Image (cartoon, rainbow, N blue to C red):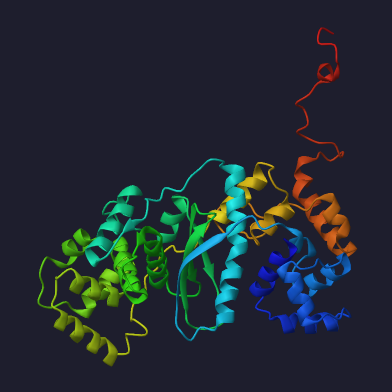
Amino acid sequence: MIGERLRQTRLAAGLTLDEVVRRLGDLGTPLTKAGLSKYERGGSTPKPTVLLKLARAIGTRAETLLQEPTVSIRWLAFRKLSTLPTREAERVKSLVLGPVEAQVWLQEKLEPGSRPRMPKPVSVTNFEGAESAAALVRERWGLDDHFVESVTGSVEENGGIVVFCESEAPGFHGLSGWANEKIPVVISRSGAADDRRRFNLAHELGHLVMTCARSTAAEEEKLAHRFAAAFIVSASVARRELGARRRRISLDELALLKRKYGLSMQAWAYRAADLGIIERRHLSGIFTTMSARGWRKSEPVEFKGHEEPSRLRQLALRALAEGVVTRDRAAQLCPGATTELTAGSGISGPQPPTARELLRLPPQERNRILAEAAVAVEQDYSPGGSLRHFDAFGDKDLNDDADA
């Protein structure tokens, strides 16, 4: 168990075996690459002193390496460029395992027995099947032909897990799989524009919903693209906005539609051609014009959406409020959950430190916090030093004899 967790945290930190061995040497704990590899394979178990140094070398806490893995993810699709290094691909998979484990654990504690509202995967062999699969998910989730305000929110509200992951190397787009064979997991690259995030997540959702056994990898990617476009903008909505048949579509019209639905201008153009609204030759003309203006890489308008996962933080705060976890545990499950403050939202900020936490602070910092607390409650005291509003109990309330 230690070996599996050790390998996961090392990969998530983006470190090679050689780099960890070198850091251990700097910490005064010599270890060979073969010895570290043996630890990771479970061939031997590091002593407590070595475990502490391993945690320091990797940049994590020793207790993290002692935690038994609780989630196994069966990855289905990894959308990336061929130039993405294998090391970076492994880092991404390891990096997202932490938040997935945390959310699965919290859901089991707070909502035992709950199940994702995902339709059973359907066999798809053509684009019409991809359209039908998208319509099936929309129907199951009660979206019908309504605007999808947030793909992230839709997945989370129906029991899925969404994680945005940073990648140090270009070429990573998205990843999808099943956690413990029952919970859908979709990953998208963070830092992308909201319309790109929406499409990436919908694309990965397509991999979870469709089985394309008769298709090549390239064909399966095209089917997932078609699913994503159909999930964000259904065929009926596209025809309602554009009409059943068009000879031309202006770029200004595509820009307006992007801002309205969160589907890129290029994806809207593809959508129109895929549904037979415009001829393929007109599609080529649109892309030629966009290329000449430099809009293929950076479109002139942006979509402002709400593509940001919030389910993990909400579960961590709920568990903290209900006494299921401590503040330290909540912060470990969702870093930043107990310290961030949403300005102007009316949401309360960080909880005051406990007495134990105060004692650990430097005297100057501790005195500052105590002074601020004294000012905050000063109005509750009378000039004589007694509480003004402590009158809920009288003398008879302090007598154990109710008849006295």
Quadrant of the image containing the N terminus: bottom right
Quadrant in the picture for residue 95: bottom right
Count of numbered marks: 0
Between 339 and 51, the residue placed more toward the observer is 51
Question: Which residue is at a point 81% across and 38% down the rendered structure image?
Answer: 382
- Residue 386 appears in the rendering: yes
Q: Most extreme residue toward the bottom, as rendered?
A: 292
How far from the left and from the top, in percent, is residue 186? 47, 63
- Residue 142 appears in the rendering: no
Q: Most extreme residue toward the front, as rendered?
A: 43
Decide if residue 241 is on the left or right side of residue 152: left
Asked if 184 appears above or below 12 in the picture, the reply is above
Asked if 47 appears above or below 103 in the picture, the reply is below
Q: Most extreme residue toward the top, as rendered?
A: 403
How far from the left and from the top, in percent, is residue 318? 61, 46
Quadrant of the image containing the C terminus: top right
Decide if residue 215 is on the left or right side of residue 400: left
Question: Which residue is at a point 60% across and 64% down the rendered structure image?
Answer: 97
How far from the left and from the top, in percent, is residue 304? 40, 68
Asked if 117 appears above or below 167 in the picture, the reply is above
Between 14 and 17, the residue placed more toward the observer is 17
How far from the left and from the top, in percent, is residue 32? 81, 82
Quadrant in the picture for residue 71: bottom right
Decide if residue 141 is on the left or right side of residue 274: right
Question: Which residue is at a point 14% across and 75% down the rendered structure image?
Answer: 278
Quadrant in the picture for residue 29: bottom right
Question: Which residue is at a point 59% across and 80% down the rendered structure image?
Answer: 87
